[in-house]
Image: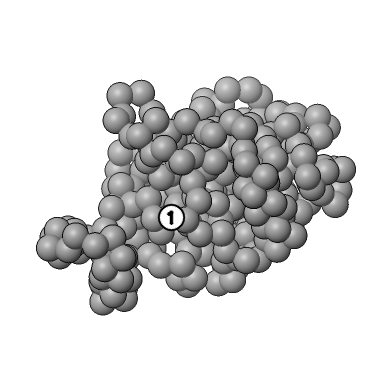
Amino acid sequence: MTLRPYRGLRLIIYRDPSTRTLVYEEIAEYLQSLIPLCTIELREEFLTHALREWGAKPRVLARSIASSRVVDILSGEPVGEPLPGEIFFEERALARPDKRVGGILYEGYTFQNILRRLIPSSEMRYGILHTVLTQRLLVTKEWGEGRAHARTIILCNPTLISTTGLVEAPALPPEIYMRLQLLSSPDMQQIVIEEEKQRHRDRVLTLGDERLTEVLKGYTLMGVFYHLFGEAFCGNPRCRLYNAHTHEELIEAQTKGAELCATHRDKLNTLQGTLSMR
């Protein structure tokens, strides 16, 4: 059952220009084929859109984004008051959204709130879902965790999907970690990780991976399910909504005959049934 009467969905997807292998039209066609009365709008990168269309101020926005940075992975807390250099860095990043930002962590819920406040109230009505693909690496520290962890998706509205998180958050094959245990230098470990990713590229996602389009079909669908039904994940490892914790699980669920399980197909059928009763 849906949480509210279903009258259709307007899904707005914001592009990540730093990930050049994504085919957004393919993602849109997939979602439209599944969801009744779904209209999909593809927009430019979210922050660029906010600056151009919603009147956001570059300096103010850069400060807000810089304030969401995380420097202590154990606490997982955002820095709050950023340094001038951090604000300047974010200003440059706003000007070049196609250039990948590496090595910086952002507290996921804080970053999501910053983006939510930018969206006009006219576009925050129920039935409108904003899905933001971002290159920024988002971390959160959930209850009971000893440290913050990288995330692939932050649910609610806007839904955030980290293209970097899809590569960095899931666990790598165990044999890669076994090799890393023999190395003490972080620089050498990073070199080995990149070597092993190439050697096991059929089992690991990488930045610019052509499979990311297929993966993002499923992750965008997770955001839709949360918006419509209040749930996003599935315990079935062959379902498109499976909350994968490893690269191999993610690739299995999203690219190898990826489908929804019977339970979640039935949920979408309820939407069609609701419409036919009107």
Q: Is residue 278 left or right of residue 51?
A: left
Residue type, mark 1 in image: Leu
x 59%, y 52%: residue: 134
Regarding residue 42, the answer to whether it shows in the image is: no
Q: Position of residue 161 (x, y in %)?
A: 53, 48
Q: Position of residue 230 (x, y in %)?
A: 51, 27
x 30%, y 38%: residue: 235
Q: Is residue 92 left or right of residue 257?
A: right
Q: Position of residue 40 (x, y in %)?
A: 70, 51
Quarter in which the C terminus is drawn: top right
Residue 79, picture quadrant: top right
Which residue is outermost to the front? 84
Q: Is residue 45 left or right of residue 209?
A: right
Residue 20, picture quadrant: bottom right
Label 1 SS: helix
Q: Tell how many labels.
A: 1
Q: In this view of the protein, which residue sits in the foreground, 95 or 120? A: 95
Q: Position of residue 221 (x, y in %)?
A: 52, 47
- Residue 214 position (above or below residue 239): below
Q: Is residue 96 left or right of residue 109?
A: right
x 63%, y 22%: residue: 4
- Residue 169 position (above or below residue 95): above
Regarding residue 49, the answer to whether it shows in the image is: yes
Residue hosting label 1: 166
